[in-house]
Image: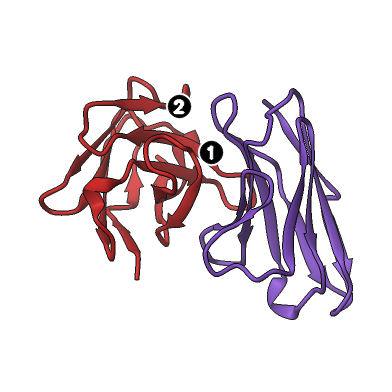
Chain colours: A red, B purple
Amino acid sequence: EVRLVESGGGVAQPGGSLRLSCVASGFTFDDYTMHWIRQVPGKAPEWVSVISWDSNSRFYGDSVRGRFTISRDNRKNVLYLQMDSLRTDDTAFYYCVRDKLGQYSYVFDYWGQGALVTVSS
Amino acid sequence: VVLTQSPATLSVSPGEGVSLSCRASQSVSRHLAWYQQKPGQAPRLLIYDVSNRATGIPARFSGSGFGTAFTLTISSLEPGDVAVYFCQQRSKGVSFGGGTKVEIK
């Protein structure tokens, strides 16, 4: 069974930092491109970032580029999202998501349960 | 690419068929997926590339369309289908529609 379990969410002040982790199990982690997608409750999801299986390629959405960094550790089956210079509009649930069709298909077939990030003073 | 879903909310009796619309501001070819999000849960992939059902999705969920107009059809609504349904394109970047909420009448 594919499982994605996020952790590291919480409350941060504007300008602060948080790091999210996602432990993957039930599949061969280093066969897959992985994504972070966020969602404000009651709104549409918003794609945040993607990383290739070998970490050689990483891309970001316009709203987080230059502030967030995606990374992975294939030995530990863990995906990370380092979030710096946080803003109040970064408040959302953050989902760790697997890419269904392999490299950069942007079809999202398995989602974690989400980690809530709240940015507030 | 802006995806516009309609209607915003749909109330349907159990056993009835349901059609949800998703319109794109420019052509996305066949690169259109549908997701189901039940209250308090993460989205779940239902359909990708217009009409391919994801693993474990029952045949009463089907998709159609091409270019800028797409439809998700639920042939016979069950109480467990109460959810918000999002469409998503991957032709030009990634974007999601605003969602259609399906309720039981």
Q: Which mark is residue A76?
A: none
Q: Residues within 10 Å of mark 2 (few under 14, many from 20)?
A: some
Query: Which SS class for mark 1?
Result: strand
Tag 2 near tag 1, CB within 8 Å: yes
- Subunit under mark 2: A
Q: Residue at x 35, y 65 (%)?
A: A2
Q: Is residue A55 above or below residue B46?
A: above
Q: Quadrant of residue B96?
A: top right
The C terminus of chain A - image quarter: top left
Residue position for label 1: A46
Q: Position of residue B12 (x, y in %)?
A: 88, 70
Q: Which mark is residue A61?
A: 2
Three-letter residue code for mark 2: Gly
Q: Residue at x 31, y 27 (%)?
A: A58
Q: Quadrant of residue A114?
A: bottom left
- Left or right of B95 on screen, residue A26: left
Three-letter residue code for mark 1: Glu
Q: Residues within 10 Å of mark 1 (few under 14, many from 20)?
A: some
- Left or right of A30 on screen, residue A14: right
> B73 or A114: which is nearer to us?
B73
Q: Position of residue A78 (x, y in %)?
A: 21, 51
Q: Residue at x 73, y 59 (%)?
A: B62
Q: Position of residue A83 (x, y in %)?
A: 30, 35
Q: Are marks 2 and 1 on the same chain?
A: yes
> A109 or A17: which is nearer to us?
A109
- Subunit under mark 1: A
The N terminus of chain A - image quarter: bottom left
Specify which label sits upstream in the sequence, 2 or 1: 1
- Left or right of B44 on screen, residue B105: right
Q: Residue at x 54, y 69 (%)?
A: B56
Query: Which SS class for mark 2?
Result: loop
